[in-house]
Image (cartoon, helix red, strand yellow):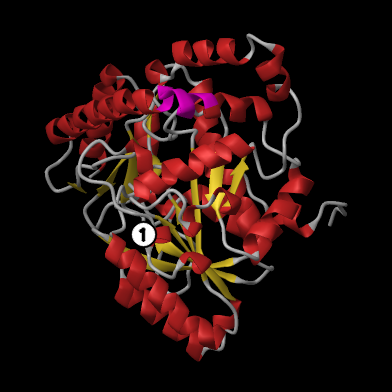
Amino acid sequence: MKRTALSALSRRTAQPPISWLMQMAFSRPKLISLAAGFTDNPSLPVRATRRLLNQLLASPTTGQPALQYGATAGDPELRQLTAAHLARQDNVQSAAATHSPDRLILTHGSQQLLYMVTEALCDEGDIVLVEDPTYFVYLGITQSRGLRCRGVRIESDGVDLAHLEQVLESLKKRGELRRVKMLYLVSYFQNPTSVTTSFAKKKAALALLRKYERAAGHPIYLLEDAAYRELRFAGEDIPSALAVRGAADRVIYTSTFSKPFATGVRVGYGVLPEPVLTAVTRIKGNHDFGTANLLQRLLARALATGEYDRHLVALRRRYGLKARVMAEAIREHFPSDIEWAMPEGGLYIWTRLPKSAHSGVESKLFKTGLANDVVYVPGALCYCDDAARRKPDRELRLSFGAASEANLRAGIARLGQALAKTL
């Protein structure tokens, strides 16, 4: 056996599926990717960003601070604006303690916050409860850190509370509840299913975690990932778990400016309780001692001038159109026995094949799709390794975010042909 100086974490860390899915989209120009969750290229705010940067750099008074280092926790003005923005979304007073900028940290995308929170809370062998299915990039974080995941079924309005209690009870009986550190929910237009968790379920899930943390001997946190919250194009917004009375000391809320403004502007944020906030801030100091200051100043100006909100109106309209285009193509080209639902926001349509079918990387469907120059995310990638159930292998995540309307129609037509050949 060849010896190596690499750490156990390095040796554990597998290539994230998102990496090869994205690389495939770049390396094959004729390939229509319905896989990687890229955002819509034509809608990126080039003119608005140029205008904001010109304003920002027009004077040394504003330009020099933007080009200098900033604070580890983030730019004070952007933290203030972000806290007020979140308070408006949750329909609470901007001065509310739960939505204070003092509890908010700015990060290099919400992905960095997910990693740092996991690093702050979890030791090797600890347990994270995740939705079944869940955001598969987060599963890569848990895998690299040597964590165990337990899947909790989701319903049309979010996490299955009866199954959540069943999982917690089974861990308690086996003496493993002390290893449970958090429940991870992608609560708005979930990646991959596009399900949104109701406020009632957030409240009930928090109550269940409190009930079982007595036996755990430590807090069990709810990590609410709201990355897609602002991409709603139908229906009404739902308050975050921060709005549950008395629950803010157990809620870790994370979101991002990348998807609603521009994915190249890698700025995310989190609202954290103590002692998690202090731990994450110290870890971030070791990571980078501060997110890119120029990007933070750009976003602060976008929020303060209303450019951010104006862009969001157009972006929601755009994604609503693209979702309808994909849905119409699915109705036309997919077999009628394939299950799917029209989303109210986000970037994805989740489809389920008949019971005898398979959609995994080694399946005939995936390979036939590639031969037809179309690729999707196999649903099996979105399920954690959980000995309590077999990993499903008949689902597909389809993204309408990046492809043009013409490519959405063509990609679904190609995938429909592949389905006709393989089902």
Which kind of residue does numbered mark 1 sit on? Answer: Pro
Q: Which of the 4 quarters of the picture holds residue 280?
A: bottom right
Res 363 seen here: no
Horizontal and vertical percent for residue 160?
Answer: 31, 69
Please state if 146 lies on the left or on the right of 10 as rendered.
left
Between 297 and 396, the residue placed more toward the observer is: 297
Within the image, what quadrant is residue 401 found in? top left
Q: Quadrant of residue 313?
A: top left
Classify 10 Å Cα crowding around label 1: few (below 14), some (14-19), many (20 and above): some
Q: Is residue 247 above or below residue 81?
A: below
For label 1, the residue is: 392
In this view, 159 is above or below 3? below
Boundaries of the magenta span:
301-308
Q: Position of residue 172 (x, y in %)?
A: 50, 87
Whether residue 226 appears in magenta in the rendering, the answer is: no
Near-viewer residue (270 or 94): 94
Name the residue at 60% across, 30% down. 296
Q: Residue at x 20, y 37 (%)?
A: 420
Identify the residue at image location x=38%, y=55%. Answer: 240
Residue 46 position, x and y percent, is 47, 13
Is 182 in front, or is 423?
A: 182
The quarter of the picture where the C terminus appears is top left
Quick check: 11 above or below 372? below
- Residue 225 drawn at (x, y percent): 46, 52
Main structural element of the magenta stretch: helix, strand or loop? helix
| Quarter of the N terminus within the rendering | bottom right
Residue at left 23%, top 42%? 344
Element type at marker 1? loop
